[in-house]
Amino acid sequence: MLLTKLYPGLKKRVKNLLKDRPVLFSVLRTIFHNIKYWSMRLRLCFTAQLSYYSPRQLLTPIELSPERIEYTDIKIDTNERGINSNNMYLIGRVIGGDWDINTLKIEQLDIYKALKDYFVDGIDLKESNLYAADITSKEKIKGEARIWYNIYAYDYQARVDRLNKLYISIKKSGYKSQEELQSDIPLDEVRVKIGRRGKILFENSIHRLIIAKLLKVDTIPAIVTVRHSQWQRFKNELFQLSRGPFSIGGEKLYQKLVHPDLQDIPYCHDCDDRYGLIYKEICTHQKWDAFTKGSVLDIGAYLGFFCHKLEEAGFNCYAIESNPTLALYMKKLKEIENKKFTIYKFDFLGNMNNEFLKREYTYVLVLNIFHHFIKNKASFDKMRKVLKKLKCKGMFFEAHNPNEKQMENAYRNFDGDTFVKFIVENSVLDKYKLIGEIADKRNLYYIYKR
C-alpha cells in the first residue's frame, strides 16, 4: 500500500533523473515492471478468491470481440465507478453489490464520440468536448481525472500524433497484445470487469478499445479484474458440471462455451472446426438475405454452441436436449447471451407426434449423436421412423468412429458412408457429399435434396 502511494511521485523523479539516459531508463523500466508483475503473482497466491485459477491464469488475458464490451463501469447516476477503483490490484477479486447495474454505454462517452468524429468523419478534435483550449501549460491542470479525459492546448499535437500512430498501427498490422509487442509492461492490456449476468464492463485503456471498435477488429486481449459474486457462483457451477456425470472423462465439458469469460472451463471440442465447415457450406448455396428466413434444428445440442453461432448468422434455431440438467444450463447460457432460440427438453426418439416434427427446417444438425441410436434394435427402429417424418432441406451429419470401444456390441455399427446412405434411404434427402474431416478423425457430411 505504501509503494502504491509513493509510486506516482517516484516515477516522476526517476523520469527526470534519467531523461537524458534513455538506455538506462529502459532497463530500469523493464526491471520495475517485471518486479511489479511477479510481486502481483506472489500476492495472488495468498489473496485470490478464485480457487479454480492459478495466479498465472488470473493474469492471462481473455480473447473477446471489442463489440462485446458495450458498457463502462461508470454509473449513470453518479458518473463515478461502481467500484471506486481502476487498477490491476483488483485482479482475482470477487465482489457483490450493485456496481454492475445502470452503467454508461461506451458510445455515450464524449471520448468515443470525439474519436469517432475524428477518425471516421475527419472532424478536428479541437471541435470536440474533450478539447480544453484554456489549458496552455501542464501546471494549469486541476485534478488527475481530467488528464485522462481531456485533450489540452499545451500538448494537443503530441496527443493527436500518438492517437494517429496507434490508429495506423492497428489498421496496418492488426491489434497486438503486449506479449506480441514484446512490451516491458505485460499487464498493460484493456482491462474489464464482469457483472452478475456476464456483462463485460470496460475499466481501462479506452483509446485502444475505441480504435479497435472503429476498425472492427475481430478480437482483442483483455484482463479481467473483478467478477461479480453472482457471476462467479454461476461459473463455479459450470466448473463442477465439467467434472460431473455430463463431462467427458470426468474432467471436461463436451463443447466450448461461447462467453469469453467461460472459455477457460475445460472442454473437449472447441467446435470451431465443425462450425467453420458448416458455415462455409451454407454460404455456397444460400444468399445472405435468405439467412433470416432459415431455420436450424440441432439434435443433441448439449449446451447450445451451434444455436448461438447460427442465430448470430441470422437463423431461427431450435435445440433438442433430452438431459434436463444440460437443458437447464443451456437456457441460462442462452439468457446470458440474449439469444432467442427454442429449447426442446425431450428425447429425440421419445414421441412421434412431438412439436419439432411438425416444422420444416432449412438445416438439421446431427453431430456425433446418431450412433447412440444404433446400439440396440429398439432405438434403431425408432430412429428410422423419425427420419421418415423429419422435414428438412439439408442435414449436416458427423459420423462416429466405428472402431470406438462403445460400439463393440452395437446392433448396427455403420462406417461413415454406409450411415449416410442409410439416412438417404430413410429420409426426404437424396444426395450427399463429404465436406471435411474433423480434428478427431470423424467425417462431416452434407446430405440434401436435389
Image (tube, rainbow, N blue to C red):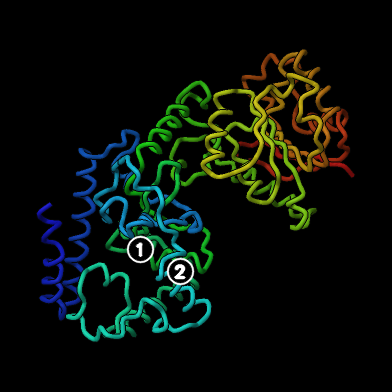
Q: Residue at x 15, y 73 (%)?
A: 15
| The image quarter in which residue 55 lies | top left
Q: Residue at x 22, y 59 (%)?
A: 33
Residue 341 appears in the figure: yes
Question: Which sits in the foreground, 249 or 218?
Answer: 218
User: Is there a contact, CB below 8 Å, between mark 2 and mark 1?
Assistant: no
Query: Residue 40, percent across and down?
Result: 22, 49
Q: Is residue 151 above or below residue 386?
A: below
Q: Residue 252: image x %, image y %?
A: 48, 30
Q: Amino acid at mark 2?
A: Ile
Does 449 appear above or below 11? above
Q: Which residue is mark 2?
A: 211
CA neighbours of label 2 inside 10 A, class few (<14), some (14 to 19), many (20+)? many
Residue ID for mark 1 = 205
Q: Earlier in the sequence, mark 2 or mark 1?
A: 1
Q: Position of residue 244 (x, y in %)?
A: 47, 23
Residue 139 as seen in the image, left or right of residue 70? left
127 in relation to 220, above or below = below
